Amino acid sequence: MHRDNPCFRFVVGRPAVAAGMLLAAAGLGGCAASGSDLDSLTDNVTRLQAEARSLAAGPESDLGLEASRSLSTRAAGEKGSAAEQSLLEAQAAARASLAASVTQRYAAEADSLRRVAADAQRQWQDALRMLEQTEKVAGREARGVNRAAPAAGPSISLPAIPAPPSDSLQDPAALLETANPWKTAAGGLGVPAADVYGRLLDAVSAAQAPKIKPEPRARHIRAATWSLRELSHRVQAESLRREGQDALGRSLAFAAQRDQALWAMVDLERGMKDTARSDLEEERARQADREQKLYESLKQFEGKFASIRREARGTIMSLPDILFDFGKSELRREAELNVAKLSVILQQFPEMHITVEGHTDNVGSEEYNLKLSEKRAKSVLDFLVREGVTAERMELKGYGMSQPVASNETAEGRQQNRRVDLVIREE
């Protein structure tokens, strides 16, 4: 563009907002991009769409890609400033689609690593229980064994996810107000955001140009909203990446502590006399017999109401989320009858300790899911107490979404993860 062109003089004071202010000028009936500029912009949008199409993973990325395609098709039938506006909006939507794809991939990776960590935690618990059983018979405690679970890293609180752009005009000031927390979050997580935030400001500035017409203004607002969604996805992706790394670190720590407990158990057994080793075998056989009887008694609930399995840490009775209404923690009336029947069986095994564990899927914040899991576990525990199971032989734990047994990427997996587990074992 020539320096004598009035559009150049209009934007030269701030090169970073050239594209947005050129659009503002176009909205005022001023200059439009040249044919070569439109061809270059079209090529860039096409490249972005091709990359977004190759990476598309999930409804969020599909939403941006479809919007970008629609806008570029629209631009093909337009000329001058109208075509440029459609292409810049298509570009913003394609960028948001790409960012959403990255977010989705980190979400899947974090979900997988959380399952690995949860499995490692269960194996550590199994090993610890076997060690404690050996210590009981040996009459002494193994030293140097870490019995505390590795702590999870601090949770990251993010702003509310911005809604997709709509044809209704939005207040630019409100849009910036929504964007600022995401910009702050990006800074706190070390996410590069100057480029996307700059594009957002450019579009907002263009929408606020004097005497701008409604349609160009709406387009600038939509482009700004797509940039906001791109910014939010960048921040979400980094948050999920850190969650995955934290889960990986905990899985390695659980594995190390599992091995530590197993080696300590082996060392104790090596130091036992033959009589003590025989006593240990008899004790394990006796417990196995009682657990088998408990398992057989609980099998009547297998199916819609519960799933039953045996692990080293005890008999696990997993109660699905059909016990509760969505987002609620109170037991459904139809579930109370089965829990009452369960209490009768548990009273026949008074030596068994019961841990009531609440679990959720990953829909919602970590804090919300932790509280919900605790409330649901408490509802089951309180009902068992009312039905005669001694409170002293029970404990409650809420794990939120930290111990999935299936992928949260599918509806079926999320349903499996919404559960209350009863871990029943002899102390």
Image: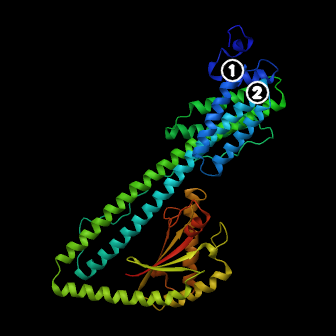
Label 2 environment density (alpha carbons within 10 Å; few <14, some 14–19, many ≥20): some
Task: Give SS at disc 2.
Answer: loop
| Amino acid type, callout 2 | Gln
List x then y, in percent, for residue 39: 68, 25
Using the rendered view, name the quadrant where residue 231 is placed: top right
Tag 2 residue: 208
Label 1, secondary structure: give it: helix
Q: How is the image coloured?
A: rainbow
For label 1, the residue is: 36
- Above or below: residue 114 compared with residue 294: above
Q: Quadrant of the N terminus?
A: top right
Residue 38 image position (x, y, % from top left): 70, 24
Location of residue 302 with respect to 15 vertically, above or below:
below
Q: Which of marks 1 and 2 is nearer the N terminus?
A: 1
Depth check, front residue: 203 or 65 = 65
Gap in Å between the C-alphas at discs 1 and 2? 27 Å
**Which residue is found at the position 28% from the left and 80% from the top?**
136
Q: As shown in the figure, which amino acid type bears the numbered disc 1?
A: Ser
